[in-house]
Amino acid sequence: MFDRRLIDNFDWILLAVLIVIGLLSVFNLYSATYTVRAFGGGQIVVRQICWYGIGFLILLLMTTFDYHMLNRVAYPLFFLSLVLLVAVLKMGKVAHGSQRWLSLGLFSVQPSEIVKISLVVILAKHFSEDERIGNYRLRDLVRPLLLTVIPFMLIVYQPDLGTALMLLIVSFSIIIFAHVNWKSIVIFVSAAVLSTPLLWLTLQGYQKKRIIAFLRPDLDPLGAAYHVTQSKIAIGSGLFWGKGFLKGTQTRLHFLPQQHTDFSFSVLAEEWGFVGSAVVLFLYLFLILWCINIARSSKDRFGTLLVIGVAASIFWHLTINVGMVTGLLPVVGIPLTLFSYGGSSVISTMAAMGLVMNVSMRRFMFQA
Amino acid sequence: MVWRSDSDLREAEIYQRRLTRLTVFIVVVFGILFVRLWFLQIIHGYRYRTESENNRIHLRDVMPSRGLVFDRNGRLLVDNRPSFILGVMPENIRNLDSLLSDLSRLVDVDRSAAEEKIKHAATADPFRCVHLKKGLSRDELARVETHMVTMPGVSIEVKPQRHCIYGTLAAHLIGYLGEIDKGQLGKREYAGNKVGDFVGKCGIEKKWHKYLDGTRGGQQVEVDASGRILRVLYQKEAEPGANVYLTIDKDLQMVAEQSLKNRTGAIVAMSPKSGEILAAASSPTFNPNDFAKGMDKRVWQELITNRHFPLQNRVISGQYPPGSLFKIVVALAGLEEGIIDPNEKVFCGGSYTFQGREYRDWKEGGHGYVDLHRALVESCDVYFYKMGQRLGIDTIAKYAKNLGLGHTTGLQLGDEKQGLIPNRAWKLRRWHVPWQDGETLSVAVGQSFTLITPIQIARFVSALCNGGILYKPQATLWIGRNGKKDLFEFRPEAAETWDVAKKNMEFVKKGLYGVVNEPHGTGWRARLHNIAVAGKTGTSQVISLPEDRETGKEEDIPYKFRDHAWFVAIAPFEDPQIVVAVVVEHGGKGGAVAAPIAKALLEEYFKTKVLR
């Protein structure tokens, strides 16, 4: 059933990096929830370990088939994820003012996570099947853009602007990598810029507040600006060696909001200092570059684009999250993949990593 | 990449180039992040470290001041007073023992309870202030403040506390505050509130929550290691609540409550032309100030175990048989239906025999020959037995309901009960036995199953005065800030109109005038020498006792078996401006007990009216 060569080509380094990140994530979460473990915080660490466990299993599962099969199921898969997105709008559980979850009895599913993967797959398929290798004009992009916009609108409607924007960014990353010609990029960017006022109108109150808080922190001192201030203090006060495990005062004092999700990097930075945060940053950099390497040695366009899509997702999540907690970007509620707490995020990322592993394992295989 | 053909090779090159560019891009972005971290942690690290250790930035709520409550003449009834809370932050305590010794010297506080509280908080959340004692007196406050420098970790918090200036005055109407509960937190109306807020639980305090509450503000403050505020970084002002002006008159309300002292019952005074409530008293009552500071367990136990239910607002939820008050309904029904001829005389010898049973009149020897007018004035039971029998229960019930009894008035100030107007269908449904004709007789004199509330009868009598308009009773005159009536202004709301001939209403009204002013009128004790008063007495049976009850004196009968005393008053008769309804539970005879109370209220009302 399994070709010996597959096992020979198993990407141990990729697995190792993921395991290290997983361990760091769990330790960090332990610290972030240390003071509230009596109130359910302890659950978070246990759950994250479970998610990782399941995640690794799924990762292995994703390597068992030839990724070229995705080529055939791309559209049905995409369609299914759209159906789930619509379902969540109609029947989803409402939490924190938005509907993102579908309850399926034993566990809950977040359709937006599934869409992330299916969109990458379908875009990779589209661009890999096209005869040309670049220089797409705007009208060639109608289908990819349409494929992107539909789930984008559905997710925005939940409302979940953060995830929707990430979807958009990842999609554009793939599209740009597939090489659009400069003229189209210019037209597109100017169109995007011009439509910003329109976008502004569709933003919800609190989302507008966040952007204002970023540009003019003095106007909203009690809201998002406060969070970022606290985050910078936490990060900065880590100095070089950090304050030590479980000794982060900003964390212990609950000055940091969302310590286990959006601001989990700040917890790390406070406790492990520049050394710690640089190491983690480096780990992620390594992960992403390793993926690029896999893309480089992939034997066909489809594989390359798949991996690029996944790498783009990790890259942008990291950049935006770290940019946000260090005050370079406005607070947009994007957690750090694989580091922050979040079951569906961990699982879907591991699934995506499984695809990457899949491509990596088959780079020497010839298709019949 | 492994490619197989020339075009593939070209493709490969192109892709290689792109990947290289991508790698460069990624490394550059990461570089920026690394630089940013270096910037925060190394270059400005010490600044942040200082900020995190010595100075901390806290978010504090700025509580809005709650709107005040006034009477109709602008006299203050409810305001907010500062309440001082002794607090301790566990994290900042150096030596717990010496601190507790110091504190117990200065303030009256339970040392072991305090110690437990602090120890518990230290493990859970050491940075949250533990409240050791609420409501510090001025002396205690002064003592603690002077010694605070030597007691790190101790703080005084000032919180506003709701204060009813006159204690129990209009307690049921005004209502009390309590901690917000889960059910309220979920509702949109309470969107600006958080756990631990004190919000209105009943009465006006609850009804006008959205105006009284105001909007909380916030501060970003810098605090030092001891929790002392160094400076305020940013501030968003709180918006104070709006003030509520009630329709009641404070002096009238005081007279009403004084009249009910040591008694159980209710008084409501209304303006018949608009539905404004001029006074509403229910006894026994409670003190809302007990709630405002956080209810004491003992006081609460007393309140809920008291057999007379002090928390019940009898004005709207006290249901009693109307007694002879109901004769007004029967009279109107009879005149409208044409069944009663005002000139017809009926002989009353003290009892009425119907279907083999004897129905007594309250007056032993009877009233002699009476027509409708006399029957009302002297409250003759026999007359109404006869007329009630002629009308039949369903007709009586129909009129009673159309005239405003048997359903709620729409006051919307709490748990209003709708009373009970029995008819044949009701009896079958409720008791599964048919209506007995003899029961109609009891209903005609306001006994048996019939139940009314004071507010219902007040509204009913008001309609009689104003030509038949049933107004919705209201207790709020206007709401606004800074004297501007911009949030709410009272407007009379007519709920229904009677379909009764004017001349019939006039006839009955004249009968009510006679009750107070003519010889043998049962309501003579409500008579005023300068104002024309009309009214009706009522004595509703609590339980029918054996024959010898009639011969016994009132004082000899145990309290709980004594009848309820009713009186409704209208004044001045020519152009009624006030209607008063009084019910005294187990008070005995309406004329003897309730009428004088109504008179006291009318005296107060006209005294100030003349003066103003």
Image (tube, helix red, strand yellow):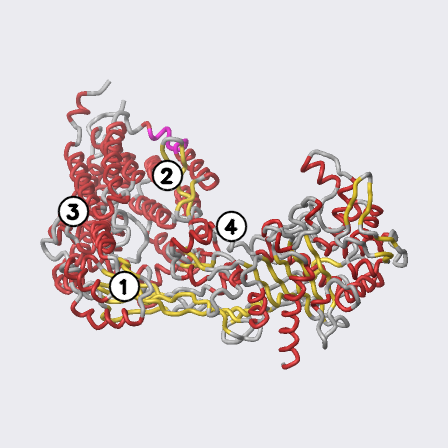
Q: Amino acid at mark 4?
A: Arg
Q: Chain of mark 4?
A: B
Q: Which residue is mark 2?
A: A110
- Determine the CA span between mark 1 and mark 4: 37 Å
Residue B499: mark: none
Q: Disc 2 to disc 3, how far (Cα)?
A: 27 Å
Give the position of the N terminus of chain B as an image quadrant: top left
Q: Position of residue A345 (x, y in %)?
A: 30, 40
- Asked which quadrant contains residue B96, the reply is bottom left
Q: Which residue lies under the disc numbered 3?
A: A280
Q: CA distance from mark 1 to mark 3?
A: 46 Å
> According to the image, label 1 marks what residue?
B86
Q: Which residues are magenta?
A: A70-77
**Where does label 4 land, which residue?**
B307
Q: SS of the residue at dot 4?
A: loop
Chain designation of label 3: A
Cα distance between the residues tagged 1 and 2? 48 Å
Q: Is residue B603 left or right of residue B378?
A: left
Closest to the observer: B166 or A59?
B166
Q: Amino acid at mark 1?
A: Leu
Q: How many marks?
A: 4
Q: In front here: B470 or B539? A: B539
Q: Residue at x 90, y 56 (%)?
A: B344
Q: Reply above or below: B9 against B107.
A: above
Q: Is residue A40 visible?
A: yes
Q: Both on one chain, marks 4 and 3?
A: no
